[in-house]
Image (tube, rainbow, N blue to C red):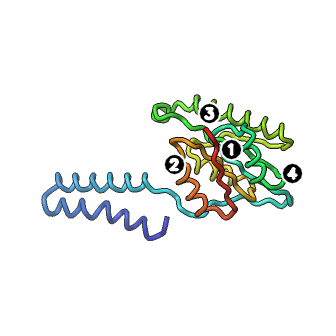
Amino acid sequence: MRTWMLPLIVVGLVLPGSLGMLIAGPGLGLAIGELCAVVVVVAAAMQRFDGPIEVARSADGRSHVLVATASAIDEPQLLEEVLAACGDRDADLLILVPARAGTLSHWTSDLGPGRQRAQVALVHSIAALAAAGLDARGKVGDADLLQAIEDALRSFPADRVVLVTEDRARVRGQSRAAAELRRRLDVPLTQLAGSR
């Protein structure tokens, strides 16, 4: 937050309520003050951090690739595309699967089924990569794809990111995430389309 914003927020909260109290009494002043507070809270809740995504750095000389996918990478064609996007077969691979929850599960904070689906997709992906001769590790991330990638990159020193999106209703949201990743990432991003 910029240094000048906090005093501006305080003035925006105090001044309208104070003027309302001076003009029409305490009732209107309190109502205006409450309305200003609601506006500030809603505006703050809608804000998203828009700075560059920081990526951990590595000094080991190896190539590091983060592969983010919403579903298992177990189809032969998709597996070949992921292998081609990774480039180096000796690269350090981290497979990231967001723990997406359904709408009802999200509102009830029941993340168990989403985490379980993500873990199954993760196991299938790592097994398919191992069968293709690659050593990969994995983790389940946040339900929000962009947040999951940002969290993983804080500790994983990726040289490139491979994003596997789905060919169904969630593609629009994943395409927005891909566009934001391209804008905020300092490492190359490859987007592949899965078939689920």
Q: Residue furthest bottom?
A: 4
- Indicate which disc, 2 or 4, sits on the residue closer to the N terminus: 4
Drawn side of residue 108 relative to residue 100, left or right: left
Marks 3/2: CA–CA distance? 19 Å
SS type, badge 2: helix
In contact (CB < 8 Å): disc 4 and disc 3:
no
Question: Which mark is nearer the camera, 4 or 3?
Answer: 4
Question: Which mark is nearer the camera, 3 or 2?
Answer: 2
Packing grade of label 2 (10 A; few <14, some 14-19, many >=20) is: few
Kind of residue at disc 4: Asp
Residue drawn at 80 percent across, 43 percent down: 136
- The numbered mark at residue 90 is 4
Marks 4/1: CA–CA distance? 18 Å
Using the image as rendered, state which of residue 103 and residue 29 is in the foreground: 103
- Indicate which disc, 4 or 3, sits on the residue closer to the N terminus: 4
- The numbered mark at residue 115 is 3
- The numbered mark at residue 96 is 1
Marks 2/1: CA–CA distance? 17 Å
Q: Position of residue 186 (x, y in %)?
A: 67, 64
Using the image as rendered, state which of residue 20 and residue 41 is in the foreground: 41
Using the image as rendered, state which of residue 1 and residue 106 is in the foreground: 106
Q: Which residue is mark 2?
A: 173
Kind of residue at disc 1: Leu
Marks 2/4: CA–CA distance? 32 Å
Q: Position of residue 58 (x, y in %)?
A: 80, 59
In contact (CB < 8 Å): disc 4 and disc 1:
no
